[in-house]
Image (cartoon, rainbow, N blue to C red):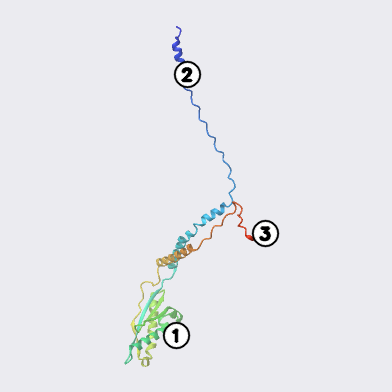
Amino acid sequence: MPRTPSRRRNTTAARVRTPAPAPAPARAPEPVPHPPGPEPAGAPEQRWWRARRWLPWLALPVCLAVGSLTGGTYGALRTPQYTATAYVIVVPEGKSEPSTALGFAQTYGRTATQLAVLGDAPVWAGVPVRTLRASVRAETSPDAPMIALTASSPLPDRAADMANAVSRALIINANVTHRDTHVRVVQFSRAIPPTEPASPSALVTALVGACAGGLLGGLALLVRHPERPRSTAGGAPVPGPATSADVRGRR
């Protein structure tokens, strides 16, 4: 049977209403890599000045580390020193006044390590005279007629022997003339071998070195930095104002 006109019109309308497919989006062209161009003038100098601003701030931690390491190394490698002290006292005799004993105590303290006073002290201590004089020091008090003889040595027993030897020699030498001076020197206390060294430990020397390094680093930060030079590559220099003499010359 022949098709009806109405069905044909519907088919034609359906064909017209069908949307056309959307076109595919165009792909963007890939960027072509360009070779690196020449570096602008003054760029290395700018980088150098930019990095130089932070260099002074590194001085403080670096100095702290170096000072602490140096102090700790010095304290660890240094030979420990032991000190021992013997005390002698000057007492007046007869009608002598206490001020006389105080004056002689000052005198004996100044001459305690002289060769004429030491006598046989190097033999009793078992060390040379030079070592004995360099290792023993005498101290006096302005308020009491007492003399402290302190000896230093890497060995604790030797330090005690040197202090006792010098005090014994001082007592013998001073009492020879006690009838003329009207004072006598007697032993107040003997020196005993120390149990701990008197020199600072490695921790203490490290702290001292760190303090010294921090001080140097702080002083380095206080130094005025040089100003950054101005670059003249961007343009020609601007001429200064003309003076009256130049204006008259041009006329």
Q: What element carries label 2?
A: helix
Q: Which residue is drawn at 45% across and 13% down?
A: 9
Q: Which badge, 2 or 1, is on the more N-terminal residue?
A: 2
Circles 1 and 3: CB atoms closer than 8 Å: no
Which mark's residue is nearer the viewer, 2 or 3? Answer: 3
Q: How crowded is mark 1: few (under 14 residues within 10 Å), some or many (20 or more)?
A: few
Along the line of sight, which residue is nearer the eye, 234 or 112? Answer: 234
Residue 9 visible somewhere in the drawing: yes
Foreground label between 2 and 1: 2
| N-term-proximal mark, 2 vs 3 | 2
Quadrant showing the C terminus: bottom right
CA–CA distance between discs 2 and 1?
135 Å
Q: Residue 5, image x and y in percent?
A: 45, 10
Q: Distance between the residues labelled 1 and 3?
A: 92 Å
Up-down relation of residue 182 to residue 130 (above or below): below
The tag on residue 249 is: 3
Q: Quadrant of the N terminus?
A: top left
Residue 213's tag is none
Mark count = 3
Q: What residue type is labelled 1?
A: Leu
Q: Nearer the viewer, residue 122 or 9?
A: 9
Q: Nearer the viewer, residue 26 or 180?
A: 26
Where does residue 159 sit, x and y in percent of width and height? 39, 77
> Which residue lies most toward the left here?
94
Which numbered dot is residue 16? 2
- Inspect the image, locate mark 2, and give the three-letter code of the amino acid beneath it: Val
Image x and y of residue 93, in percent: 32, 90
Q: Vertically, is 211 above or below 136? A: above
What residue is disc 1 on? 115
- Quadrant in which residue 139 is drawn: bottom left
